[in-house]
Image (tube, rainbow, N blue to C red):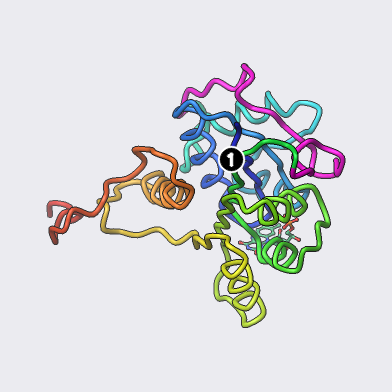
Amino acid sequence: MPWIVGVSGASGTPYAAAVLRALLAGGESVDLVVSRASRLTLLDETGISFRDAHWRDDLREWLARGADGKPDAFDVDVDGDAVRYWAAGDLAAGPSSGSYPAKGMLIVPASTACVAGVALGLSKDLLQRVASVTLKERRTLVVAVRETPLNGQTLRHLVALDDAGASVVPASPAFYAGATHIQDLVDFVAGRVLDAAGVGHGLYRRWKGELGGGARPA
Ligand SMILES: Cc1cc2nc3c(=O)[nH]c(=O)nc-3n(C[C@H](O)[C@H](O)[C@H](O)COP(=O)(O)O)c2cc1C
């Protein structure tokens, strides 16, 4: 069964790329939904114009890119059956029904608009519809919200999502894991998203109870 990955229009497309790479490297299959707004953030953050008609080529280029913008930093195979793509406007897509088999959904990054839409059950596009379906089917839903500061409205929406059974995983990197590159900080967030979904990975160094483990030599 696949994991459904929803990419909404918050800053943080490298987080989505890191989650997708880790899922595929771990032998998981993925159903991908990319919101209309996220094409703007992807274009801004990577220079890639994501096209429904050429999604495989664009996804290959995106997942190969490092968080520092370097192309061909990763070698990722997106050519087989492991990735299925659904257009955000396609409300008749398979995952829009609870009868479509899926392990759950990871929304990474999640915009505050997406958080609001899912909390209120708006289903304004396929991404939001799949999130609502995931909740009603009592499957795992992880929401990696990316915004700062947060207003009371968004905080209330996040509480509503938590009450509904979702895991809210703010895209907030930590510095105890010895990060030396932007990619390390990205991988930490991606790893915590996968932790919340119970997916194994080796994206970051876990805390071992010893202070100073992340300190760099002078
Ligand atoms: C370059 C750029 C960066 C953005 N960053 C964020 C962000 O970090 N968090 C957020 O909540 N919205 C952000 N937005 C606004 C969302 O894209 C906007 O609210 C959009 O309606 C979200 O739609 P979606 O949830 O359907 O993807 C950003 C927009 C652009 C163009």
Provide the major secondary structure of the magenta segment: loop
Query: Which residue occupies 16% across, 58% down?
Result: 209
Q: Position of residue 205 (x, y in %)?
A: 27, 46
Residue name at image x 69 percent, y 28 percent: 84
Which of the four quarters of the rendered structure image does ligand 1 lie in?
Answer: bottom right
State whether label 1 is within 8 Å of ligand 1. no
Question: Does the magenta-highlighted stretch encompass residue 74?
Answer: yes
Quarter of the view holding residue 80:
top right
**Residue 1, image x, y percentages:** 60, 31
Q: Is residue 46 left or right of residue 178?
A: right
Relative placement, left or right, of 195 versus 88 is left
**Residue 27 place in picture, x, y as percent:** 48, 25
In this picture, which residue range is highlighted in magenta? 73-98
Asked if the magenta segment contains residue 146, the reply would be no
Crowd around label 1: few <14 · some 14–19 · many ≥20 (10 Å): some
| Numbered-mark total | 1
Q: Which residue is mark 1?
A: 103
Amino acid marked by disc 1:
Lys
Label 1 SS: loop
Work out whether residue 96 or residue 183 is closer to the camera in this orientation and state it: 96
Please state if 109 lies on the left or on the right of 8 as rendered.
left
